[in-house]
Amino acid sequence: MLKNFCITAVLLFVFASCSQPAGEGGKATTDTTASARDEHTLSNADSVKMQHLDLDIKVDFGTKTISGSAAWAIDNRGKVKTLHLDTYDLTIDSVFVDGKKVVHTLDSMIQFLGSRLNIPIQDNSKEVVIWYKTGKNARALQWLEPHQTGGKKYPFLYTQSESIYARSWIPCADGPGIRYTYTAKVAVPKDAMALMSAENPQQLNDSGIYHFKMDIPVPAYLMALAVGDIRFRSIDSRTGVYAEPTMIDKARYEFADVGKMVATAENLYGPYRWGRYDVIVLPPGFPIGGMENPRLTFATPTIIAGDRSLVDLVAHELAHSWSGNLVTNATWNDFWLNEGFTNYFERRITEAMLGKSFSDMSWELGYQTLVANVAELGKDSKDTWLKLDLKGRDPDDGLTDIPYEKGSHFLKLIENTVGRQKFDAFLRKYFDEHAFKTITTEQFLSYMDANLLHGDSTLYNQINVKAWVYGPGIPPNYPRSNPERFKAADSIAAIYGHGIYGKDIETRNWSTFEWLEFLHKMPDNISIDMVKKLDEDFRFSSSGNSEILFAWFVVALKCKDDYMPAMTAMEGFLSTVGRRKFIEPLYTALMKRNPALAKEWYKKYRSNYHPLAQESLDKITAGQKLS
């Protein structure tokens, strides 16, 4: 998932103690045989293997519900008497075990986790069928009215199952370390197309019935569904793009190089093992940058800039096809094994395609984000460790920039220490040997010690593994990039900072990253005259690039006086964009500046935002600090 607080944390300035103690010589003691306990599933999938899901559901836009059956093929290898599954605000109509109706129970709701479903089973039970429907508080689902879509004619539904939201639309064992195959039959309105994280149709059919198959085991957080007025365009023989009709041509143009991106990734770390790689551009309310659902990346429309300047997001989600989807963190405490590896891989893909000068800028912006996030959380906070302990907490508390940026910089340090050629060979072997498996932090460190460091204590201490994984803040041996391409942006920003302006400055070939660096360097006490001059010279308020536009709004909000062209553009932005990376810091800044205006805008546009974004924004606009 591209949460990507990069830029957000820089502009606006949560992983407790590790589960393994430090051993002799500073190395973390590891147990590569013991299974990790997942504190965020109420299921007993450690005793009952969830082998296959056969889903048969109907999507009803009138009642805003998903209803039907989830048939689970199971192996009761633990010979337990009860199967426990995760649910959240589901109504369970009936349950059948091997064709016979049984009496089930549903426990009381537990904060964050939902309600445990208890089903009596026998030692030799093979199939459990659950008839159910979703509730009004299904945290994974966003139901869009026609006016909230691009085309304004048809409703739209999409899911967001990470981290533990699959349980709000499917009764399941909802943990990243629990993998299963699935098939699905989905009934939708006849004017809508359905897509899943599976083998997908490319054309609307006449029946409104769609069939799906995922023959590779995946965890519940990678279950995904989108339903709406959707079209498809091919990019090459194994890649393509889906979007609403009003967006499809723009999306096809923007993603023209996705096929080359897949080939570039394969050249780095081995074959793409998922068949097709397609992207769907969702309506504006999608709360994150992208979600790496297998075979079908879900993407925000905010990356459609018209000049292919923001498609590094696709590189991130594609990289998840190796780190995260192929090799999965066993629990949410090991989240950095997902996002840290993916951030590193993303930058290697963009370096291979766009050059080192481009990736150096990404590394530097990422470092700035890491510094800002550590400052926000506290340099001694255990929330800045890579290895988490999220027991008793919402796993989304771990979705800070730390696993992304501290994790990727840790890998960059290892690369610098052992050499790129050796590190690349190690990573390719790691992906091959752990394909379609899960792994803990301790298992990874043990594997790295055996296959890369070979027990060399000098290398281990040079990298300072313990400090990076089981320590707070940023260790002193962090790798730092010094992008040549930022020098011009920094010098021009300094000129403007001194009140010296000029239209003859050469910026025609600047990338998004250079513009962001330039805007980051604007002074906190910026004057209204300077804001006006910046907009006059560079037309920021009318930019079609969401990253630049957001950074510009933050600059404008630093000014004591309202600059009305920026404020007007900001309201238009907040009325259509639901990406939390943008809207949460803007509402936070607005609440400090003009609470009445912030609340007025939020009341007007709240229905456009995903339920997860609404939860956060409700707290922000109530004047509470977002945890």
Image (tube, rainbow, N blue to C red):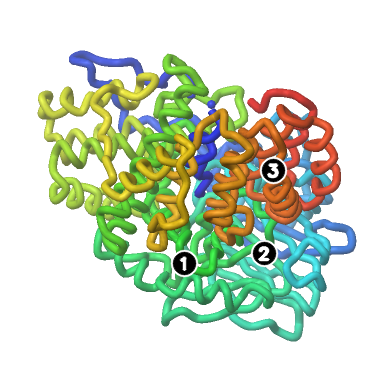
Task: Select label 2 or label 3 by which is in front.
Answer: 3
The label nearer to you, 1 versus 2, is: 1
Type of amino acid at the residue the image marks with label 1: Arg
Circle 2 residues within 10 Å: few <14, some 14–19, many ≥20: many
Contact (Cβ within 8 Å) of mark 1 with mark 3: no
Q: How far across and how far down the image is residue 391, in percent?
A: 55, 23
Label 3: how many residues lie within 10 Å, few (<14), some (14-19) or many (20+)?
some
Quick check: 459 left or right of 543? left
The residue sitting at 70% across, 84% down in the picture is: 205
Nearest the viewer among 591 and 54 is 591
Rendered-image quadrant of the C terminus? top right
> What number is the disc on residue 308?
1
Mark number, residue 226: 2
What distance separates the C-alpha of mark 2 from that of mark 3?
39 Å
Taking depth in this image into account, of 92 and 406 the one nearest to the observer is: 406
Residue at the spot 58% in from the left edge and 67% down from the top edge: 280
Q: In the rendered view, would you say 356 is above or below 378? A: below
SS of the residue at dot 1? loop
Q: Which mark sits nearer the N-terminus, 1 or 2?
A: 2
In which quarter of the view is residue 524 placed?
top right
Q: Give the Cα separation between the discs numbered 1 and 3.
A: 30 Å
Nearest the camera: 408 or 481? 481
Q: Position of residue 48 (x, y in %)?
A: 55, 43
Tag 3: residue type? Tyr
Residue at mark 1 to residue at mark 2: CA–CA distance = 24 Å
**Disc 3 on helix, strand or loop?**
loop
